[in-house]
Amino acid sequence: MLTLAAYLHDISPFLVEFSPGFGLRWYGLSYAMGFAVAYLIFRFLCKRGYTTIPEQKLIDGLLLLIATVIVGGRLGYVLIYDRAILTQFDAAFPYWGVLRLSQGGMAYHGALVGVALGVWYIAKKNKVSAWHVADVASLGASIGLGLGRVANFINGELLGKIVAAPGEPAPWWSVKFPQELVSGHEPPLTDAQQQQLGDLIARVAKPNDDGYLATSRLIDAVQHGAPSIRGPIKQALEPLLSARHPSQLYQAFFEGVVLTVVLWIIARKPHLTGMVAAAFLGVYGVLRVIAEFFRLPDAQFGAAARIAGLSRGQWLSVLMVAVGVAAFVYLRKVRSPINPGWATK
C-alpha cells in the first residue's frame, strides 16, 4: 500500500512502459496536466471578465508559454546545474543530451525567465499591459508547479535530507529512496552494509555492467521486478537505505496549495494590475527558501553547493523575493490600474 509510513519508494517513473526505457512517464504527464489546468483557468478568467484579452488569443498565448517553459526550463537546468550535458552526444535519438527531456532535468528559475519573455511578447502582440498578462499567467501556473513536484517525488529525484541512517529506526513519515544510490548522495554505510549492498547489486548485474548500470538494474528490479524477485530485493535493500524528508511533497504543498490559495485570494477582489505577479514572485521565493532547508543541494557542485548556508536555488529565490518586493513598491508608486477581480462580475 502506498503510504509514507517507513515507506520504501518503489514507484515506477512510467505510467505505461511500452519497452525498456520507453513509455509514458509521470514526469511528462505532470507537465501535460499542468498545461491543461492552465487552459481551464484561462477560460475561467475570460468568462469572469478578469482579463480583456479574447479567449482565443489567450489560448494562443498559452501555447507560446508552453514552449517558453520547456525551452527556458531545460536551458536553465543545463546552464545552472549541469553544463556537462552540453557535450553529451550519442548515436541514440535525440542524439544530444540537451534534448533528452524524457529523463527529467528542468530548472524552475530557467522556466521563469522563459515565461517572462513569453509574457512580454504576448503583451506586445495584443497591446495590453505586461503586468496584466503576468497576473493571468501567475494564476495559471501554481497548480502546475505542484504537479511537477509530485512528479519529482515519483521519479525519486531532488532528494530530501537524511533523518535516519541506514539500519536505524526511522520516523513514520520518512521515505527511503533507492535512487539515492545513483544520485551522488550515497548513504553512509558501514563496511558490513557496503558488502551487503555489493552482494545485492551482484545478484542483478550483467557481465559487462559498470557500477552505475549495475546499480540502476537494482533500482529497476525494485520498481519493475517480478513479485518473486521484487519482494526479496526490497526486503534486503530496505535496511541499506537512508530515511529522508519527502521534500518533494513539501514543495508540492507549498507551491501547489499554499501559493495557489494566496494568489487567488489576492485576485478575488479589486487589486492593482501586476499585484498578483508581484505576490507570485515574493511568496514563491519565500516558500522555496523554506522548503530547500529540507532538501539536499545538487551533488555536482560539491563543496560549492551552498554559499553562506544557502543553495543556488535558494539564492535565486531570494532574488525573486527582492524583485517581487520591488514590483510591489513600483506598482503602488505609479498607481497601476485597478483590476476588478475575478469574483466581482
Image (cartoon, helix red, strand yellow):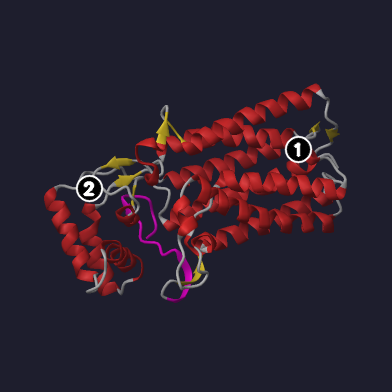
**Mark 1 in CB contact with mark 2 (< 8 angstroms):** no
Q: Residues within 10 Å of mark 1 (few under 14, many from 20)?
A: some
Q: Is residue 14 magenta?
A: yes
Query: Outermost residue, front direction?
Result: 87
- The residue at the point 74 percent across, 37 percent down is 267
Instruction: Quickly name the residue at label 1.
Output: 268
Image quarter where the N terminus lies is bottom left
Extreme residue toward the bottom, this view = 19
Q: Is residue 323 above or below residue 119?
A: above
Amino acid type assigned to the residue bearing label 2 in the image: Pro
Please tell me whether mark 1 sits on a helix, a strand or a loop: helix
The residue at 16%/63% (across/down) is: 199
Range of residues picked out in magenta? 1-19
Which of pointers 1 and 2 indicates the residue nearer the eye?
2
Rendering coords of residue 336 (x, y %): 83, 29
Residue 268 magenta: no
